[in-house]
Image: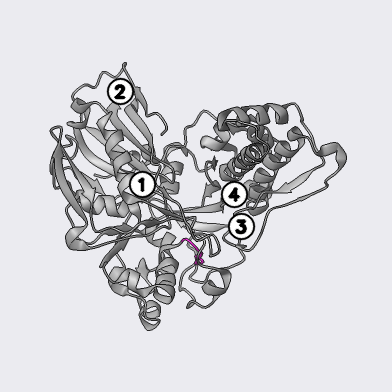
Amino acid sequence: MQAPRREEDKASNAVGSPCILGIDLGTTSVKAVLMEETRQGPAVIASCTEATGAAIESHDISGPKRDEQDVRRIVAALDACLGKLPPQSLQRVNRIGISGQMHGVVFWKTSRGCKWVERDRRWRFEPDAVSPLVTWQDGRCSSHFLSSLPKPRSHLNVATGYGCATIYWYLANNPDFLKPYDAAGTVHDYVVTMLCGQEKPRMTTQNAASWGYFSTTSRSWNTDILRESGFPICLLPEVVQPGDIAGRTAYAWHGVPKGTEVGAALGDFQCSVRSCMTQDTDAVLNIGTSAQLTVAMPSEFRPGDTPDPNSPVSYYPYFDNRYLVVAASLNGGNAVATFVDMLLRWMADLGIQGSEPEIYQRMIKAALAQAETGLCISPTIFGERHSPERLASATGIATSNLSLGHVVRALCRGVVQNLQAMLSSDRLKQAGVQRILAGGSGICKNEVLRQEVEKAYPFPVVYGKDVDAAMGAALALRQKK
């Protein structure tokens, strides 16, 4: 398991002032930050990151790709994070903001969603009658299956991995699975609901839009369409605005005072953008497990209620009734990680031992020595939401470009060019973009990706801004009066 990371601002002179706890439940890790007001503005005084190790291995290799996670492990990683934050600072928390991986769905029984226990003089909750989390990466809903679903009244398409699509899949393929449950939400909706001792979740428009069958124009579910097709309407959460308070903590959770305000769960993407975007002329590029490029739309912009299934960009609800235009690629750091895993498997087949960090370091070094290549790699091994059947490919293969350096350079270039094809430089210019704020674990540790971004986009690229969903969740609650 990844070692937890802790950061403290020893220069903070606001000892005793109220803190906001920001949490992000990511795809592979959980992060918690403590933010307080200083004379210079909001500052993170402590943070901790913990890998979840929550992936559930699928043994059905012949069927469609499943991607599920153990909610108990996610909550355990969250407990581990909070257990490493300063207890005296946790006691000063007066608000909690939570974000998490969008689109996915978890089910629970309202009367038995969790059990509260006290250990080491700290209260925490343990998931009880809870299903696995079906994540945004789940691939069970094929194009054929999605085409059989009713058309949504929304500007957003419905794709595999979306909450409503997953529920439809269970209705068609395993209806008994749904019978024990009477509530559903994203995993961060679940955590907020348990913290507040509530039965039904209150879901923000950000998460509702990511589930499908939600109109951001009317801020309501397509209940008429869903009900007519036999969809269990009872599983749909109540929808509220981003920044609204969902409730108050039912226990003194990890020393956070009982009765502390908890914000309704937010989208991790919107919170990542909120953490670093300071001007409307900023574009934000994040390359982590997946990859996203986004810019804020004008305040008067409103999308329609008809989805364009072929559009490579989407419009996500942001804050203050605004929207982001987003190129959200399913292929980012995960494409590079898949290549590393392939190399390790090949080495194992040849009887050669190697470690992931060593292989990664060596292949980046090889690519840095190979500035150009005629090899072209389309890295869409995970498909794209607007083109789910699309596969990865390589062209321009020659005996002169088969070295590791050529291949890794072409792979990293392909990740960036795939994003550029979705949201071009010309479109960014039309939106008035003056600089790109880049972040995410994939780009921060990969100098080759950084070089390719700077080649692809004719704007200054700033790497100093941290793209941090946990910080964005805290900042979103800071604005709430």
Q: Position of residue 146 (x, y in %)?
A: 52, 72
Q: Which residue corresponds to mark 2? A: 39
Q: Which residue corresponds to mark 1? A: 99
Describe residue 391's horizontal placement relative to residue 295 as left or right.
Answer: right
Q: Residue furthest front?
A: 351
Q: Which residue corresponds to mark 4? A: 331
Predominant SS along the magenta part: loop
Describe residue 351's horizontal placement relative to residue 144 as left or right.
Answer: right
Q: Residue furthest right?
A: 399
Are the residues flagged by discs 2 and 3 in contact, CB closer than 8 Å? no
Q: Does 423 appear above or below 50? A: below
The one nearer the camera, 200 or 312, is: 200
User: Within the image, what quadrant is residue 310 found in?
Assistant: bottom right
Q: Could you say which disc has been placed on residue 152 in the image?
A: none
The one nearer the camera, 183 or 398, is: 398
Crowding near the residue tagged with mark 2, few <14, some 14–19, many ≥20 C-alpha atoms within 10 Å: few
Query: What's the distance in space between the residues labelled 2 and 3, CA to CA?
Result: 47 Å
Task: Tell me which label, 1 or 2, sits earlier in the chain.
Answer: 2
Crowding near the residue tagged with mark 1, few <14, some 14–19, many ≥20 C-alpha atoms within 10 Å: many
Q: Disc 1 vs disc 2: which is toward the camera?
A: 1
Query: What's the distance in space between the residues labelled 3 and 1, CA to CA?
Result: 25 Å
Query: What's the distance in space between the residues labelled 4 and 1, CA to CA?
Result: 22 Å
Task: Tell me which label, 2 or 4, sits earlier in the chain.
Answer: 2
| Magenta segment | 156-161
Q: Is residue 159 magenta?
A: yes
Q: Residue furthest bottom?
A: 228
Query: What's the distance in space between the residues labelled 4 and 3, CA to CA?
Result: 8 Å
Q: Which residue corresponds to mark 3? A: 383
User: Helix or strand or loop: what does disc 3 sit on?
Assistant: loop
Q: Amino acid at mark 1?
A: Ser
User: Helix or strand or loop: what does disc 4 sit on?
Assistant: loop
